[in-house]
Amino acid sequence: MLISGAMLLSALAKIGIGIYNYTNGSNGILFLFFGGGGLFLTAGDYLVFKKYPGKGTEIKWLLNHISRMIGALIASITAFLVVGLSTNSLFAWIVPSLIGTIFIMYWLRKMKAKFNR
């Protein structure tokens, strides 16, 4: 719950910075985009905490966390391939997502099996 609270504050700060930059003629679109995404994910966390009180919350939070961490890895690898290596091909956009999705499914199944024992 503490991590989600910190993420909420961070998201609100990013939205505030984005609005400030945008209204002062600077480019604040990335702050608004990432702040909005953080706000969306935080709302999802709070719904999980509300729906699964007690021990179920920890398991659901861990599964969400694993998915998001691997999703961040997918985004980082895609950004590196497209921007860092200047590989602007469909291959560079799709392959990290395909491999990462398989990786997410593997870890979620493994963790669900571990907790269902």
Image (cartoon, rainbow, N blue to C red):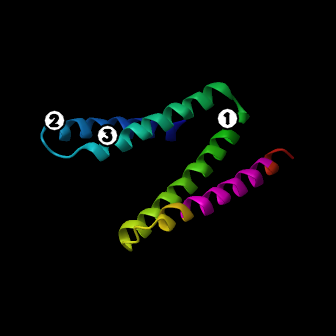
In this rendering, would 61 be left or right of 114? Answer: left
The region drawn magenta spans 96-112
In the rendered image, the vertical position of residue 105 relative to residue 34, given as above or below: below
Q: Which residue is mark 2?
A: 23
Image coordinates of residue 53 in percent, x first then y, are 68, 27
- Asked if disc 2 and disc 1 are in contact, CB closer than 8 Å, the reply is no
Amino acid type at circle 1 is Thr
Image coordinates of residue 24 in percent, x first then y, are 12, 39
Choose the circle earlier in sequence order: 3 or 1. Answer: 3
How packed mark 2 is, by other alpha carbons closer than 10 Å (few <14, some 14-19, many 20 or more), is few
Image coordinates of residue 56 in percent, x first then y, are 72, 35
In the rendered image, the vertical position of residue 85 relative to residue 79, given as above or below: below
How packed mark 1 is, by other alpha carbons closer than 10 Å (few <14, some 14-19, many 20 or more), is some
What residue is at 27 percent from the left and 43 percent from the top?
Answer: 29
Q: Which residue is mark 1?
A: 57
> Which residue is situated farthest in the front direction here?
90
Choose the circle earlier in sequence order: 3 or 2. Answer: 2
In the rendered image, the vertical position of residue 92 relative to residue 116, given as above or below: below
Q: Nearer the viewer, residue 65 or 82?
A: 82
Q: Which residue is mark 3?
A: 32
Disc 2 to disc 1, C-alpha distance: 40 Å
| Total numbered circles | 3
Quadrant placement of the N terminus:
top right
In magenta stretch: residue 92: no
> Which residue is situated farthest in the left direction here?
24
Image coordinates of residue 76 in percent, x first then y, are 46, 62
What residue is at 19 percent from the left and 41 percent from the top?
Answer: 21
> Which residue is situated farthest in the right direction here?
117
